[in-house]
Image (cartoon, rainbow, N blue to C red):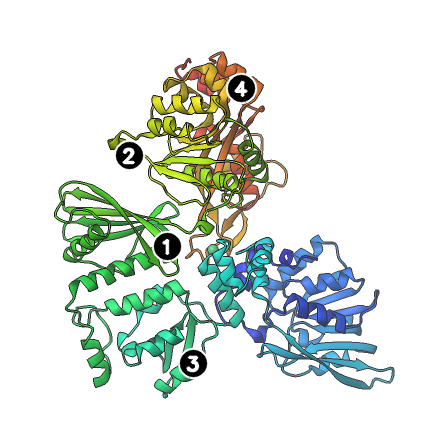
Amino acid sequence: MDRARFVPYEMRSWVYQDRPIPVGEGRSIPSLGAQAALIDALRMVPGERVLEVGTGTGYAAAVLATMGARVDTVERLPRLAAAAAERLAALELDVATHCGDGFEGWDDRAPFDAILVSAGAHEVPAKLLQQLAPGGRLVIPTRPHEIRQTVLRFTKDADGHISEEPLGELAFVTLLGDILVEMGAATRQSVEKAAAKPGALGDALVGLGALSETDLYRALALQRGLPLGHVESLLTDADPMLAAGVSRAFLEHNRMVPLARRDGRLLVATSDPEASVADLAKAFPSRRVELQLVTPTDYRRLWAALDLWDPVGDLPREKPEADPRAADLLDSRVDPDAEGRNRALFEAILLDAVGARASDIHFEVYGESVRLRLRIDGEMRDLTHITMTREQLSAVLNVLKVSSHLDIAERRLPQGGRFRTRVGDRTFDLRVQTQPSLYGEHAVIRLLPQDENRLPTIEDLGFSKEIATRYRRLLDSPSGLILVVGPTGSGKSTTLYAGLQVLARDATRKIITVEDPIEYALRGVQQAQVRPHLGFAFANAMRAFVRQDPDVILVGEIRDGETALEAIRASQTGHVVLSTLHCNDTIDTVQRLIDLGMHPNSIASEILAIFAQRLARRICDGCRRPAELDPTLVSEVFPQGPPPGFQSYVGAGCERCTGRGTYGRIAVVELLEASPGLRHAIAHRLSVDELREVVEGDSLHSLRKSALELVAAGKIPFAELRRLLPPERLAPSTGRADIHRVGPRRTG
Ligand SMILES: [Zn+2]
C-alpha cells in the first residue's frame, strides 16, 4: 500500500508545516519500516477487532484492515480524523474512524483483540489495558519526545493478568526521502536515483536538479523538528552587535549566526541541521538559545545583510548594550573601501534574487528614489528590504559595468554585456543591459543558471505523458523541421534544450547549434554564437554548418526569410532542424512561414511539428487543495456543462509559496503534428481558418485541451485558462471556425 496516497494534497501543508513536530499530538511520523514493525508486533490474525490510537493519515488503519482486521481508529484532531475517514471510506475498508482522546480507548466498541498506539505515549494508559480482551495485545511506543522510542507489548492472559515485554527501539524519524516524496517535493524515482549516489541524499537530489534547496531544508526542518526561518522575518529585529561579539571564524565554522534577543531567548539561525547550540550557549550563558534552520543561501543572505548594516546610518535599530569589544569589531567594519562595500551590496542583492528564484533583477530610478525589483515566475515583485540611494545605485552599476566589460563613462547609450559568477554552489551567467532614462541609468540583469543538471528534462517541462512521448518520437525523425513558437518569455528555448539533451545522449548523432545568445552550455553539443555585425548571422552560420555534416541543427530563432530558407534547405538535405519563431499559435505559424517566403510545398513536405507554448502558474505542491469551480468560467469553458467528475485545484497559500498558492511555472503546449491532411491542406494553400478546420480533431492537440489536462491533474488553477486562452477559444472548437470567418480571410 502506497503511503504517499495517505498524505493527500490538502493535508500536506498541515502535516508538514514549518514548526517543531508536535510530538504530544502524535505527529511524529514513524518511518515506513517502523510502522511495519509496530503492526507486526501486534501479532494480529484476520477477523480480530483492532483499536488504533492516533489515526494520523489513516495509513496504518488501512494496512490493518487490508490484513483482515475489523478496525476502530481514534484521532484527537477533528481535521485529521475527518480527512482520514473520507480517505478510508473511499477505499471501502472495514474501518470505523472516531474523533476523541484515543488514550481513553473507545468504550462502545471494547474489548479489542489488539490495540496499536501509533502516536507514542509518556505512560501506558490504564484504560487501554482494561479494554483488552483476554489474549489481547497492546503495542505502544514510549518516550514520545525522543527520536528512538522503546516499543512495549502488553499481553492479557485468560485470567486478566497482564505481562509486559520490551520489543526494542524503533527510529521515529522518517527517512528524508519519504518526507520529500510525501511533501510532493521529489518523486520516488528521483529519490531512488539519488540514493544510489555517494554522499547525503538531499545534496545528491539537489545536484541532480530534482529538488530545490528550499524544499530540502523544509524537509530537514520537519525531520529535525526545527522551525525553518526566513530572511525577511529573521532580519526584522536583528541586532548586528550580537554576531559582532563572537568570533566570525567560530560562527562560520558552525554555520550559525546569532540574530536577536527575544523574550530572554537568543535567536540563532543555522544552515546546519545537525547544529549543536552547546558551544554558542557558552558565549551567551544567560540566554536560552533558540535555533532556526535556514537554507545555505539564506544563511549567506543573513551575513550579507549584517555586513551591510550601516553603523552610522539612520536605520532604526535597538541601542546595543555597551560592550567595548563588540564596538571595536564593529568600528573596524566601517569600511573605507567603498568599492568593497558596493560589491557587498550587489552580492546581497544577487543572493536575494537567487534565493527568491528570480530570473531577472531590475534596477530602476525615479526622481530621487531607487526601485529594486525581481522577476519571479514571470511577475515583477519589489525587493523592499534593501534600500539604495541614487549614489549607491550608480556605484553598484559601476561594479556591474566593470564586471561585464562595459564602458563606465557611458551613461547616455544603452549597453549590453555579460559575466559569470558563483552564487553559493551555483554558477550563473549574468546578462547585463543598461539603459538611459529620464532620471538616470536603469539596468536589468538576467540570471542564467549554468549547471547542466538543472536544465529541465522533457518530463520537467510539465508536458503531458502523451505530448512528451510524441516529442521524443519527433526527435527520432531522420529529418524535418520542428518549431516551437510563442511570445517572448514563454520558455521556447527551454523546450528545445530539453529536446537537445535527449539528442545529445545519443552518441550516433552530431548536433550543432547557432544561437543568440548561447543560454546554456551543453555537453556533447557544438554550440556557436551568431555575430551579425561580423557577417555571421543565422543564415550565414546555417550555410557554414551544414558543411560540417551534422545530423541535428538548432537555430536559435527564425527571424528572417533568409534563415527560413536555410532551415528548409537543411531539412531537405536530411537534417533535423529545431528552431523557434515569434508567433502565437501553431496554425498561424504556417502562414508566417509563407510570409517569410517559404514555398507552401516545402513547408508541407518538411514540417514535422509545431509546438505553440505558454507558461502557466503552477499550483504549489505544499498547499494544493480541491477548489470550488467558478460558475462563470465554467459556463464559458463548458457551454454544455463540465464533464462528469471535473475537478480543479488551487493552492491555499503556505510558507513555501509565500502565501501565493502558486510556485514556479509550467509549459502549456499546443501541438500540431504533420499529417497527410495537413500537408495536403498547406500545399493547396488553404486559408488559416480552413487549415484549422482540417486539423481540428485530426493532428492538433489544442492549447485548450492541454490546459484542461493540467487543470484536472492539479497542476494549474482553473482560472489560468483566462490568461492562457483568448476569450473565443475558451469554449470547445464547435462553432469557433464561424467566429474566425467573420474576420478578413488570409490566403496563402
Ligand atoms: Zn504553497
- Which residue is more in the foreground, 509 or 296? 509
Dot 4 corresponds to which residue? 678
* Crowd rating for badge 4 (residues with CA inside 10 Å; few <14, some 14–19, many 20+): many
- Depth check, mark 3 against mark 1: the one in front is 1
Tag 4 or tag 3, which sits nearer the N-term?
3
Tag 4 or tag 2, which sits nearer the N-term?
2
Amino acid carrying label 1: it is Thr
Dot 1 corresponds to which residue? 427
Amino acid carrying label 4: it is Leu
What is the secondary structure assignment of the residue under circle 1?
strand
Q: How far apart are marks 1 and 2 (CA)?
A: 25 Å
Tag 3 or tag 2, which sits nearer the N-term?
3
Amino acid carrying label 3: it is Val
Dot 3 corresponds to which residue? 277
- Which residue is more in the foreground, 146 or 125? 146
Q: From the image, which quarter does the C terminus lie in?
A: top left
Q: Are marks 1 and 2 in contact (CB under 8 Å)?
A: no
Picture quadrant of residue 282 = bottom left
**Residue 180 seen in render:** yes
Picture quadrant of residue 289 = bottom left
Q: Distance between the residues labelled 3 and 4?
A: 69 Å
Image location (x, y in percent) of residue 630: 50, 41
Residue sitting at x 41%, y 57%:
658
Residue sitting at x 38%, y 75%:
253
- Residue 347 vs 152, above or below: the answer is above
Picture quadrant of residue 278 = bottom left
Q: How far apart are marks 2 and 4 (CA)?
A: 36 Å
What is the secondary structure assignment of the residue under circle 4?
helix
What is the secondary structure assignment of the residue under circle 3?
loop
- Residue 703 vs 710, above or below: the answer is above
Residue sitting at x 24%, y 76%:
318
Q: Distance between the residues labelled 3 and 1?
A: 32 Å
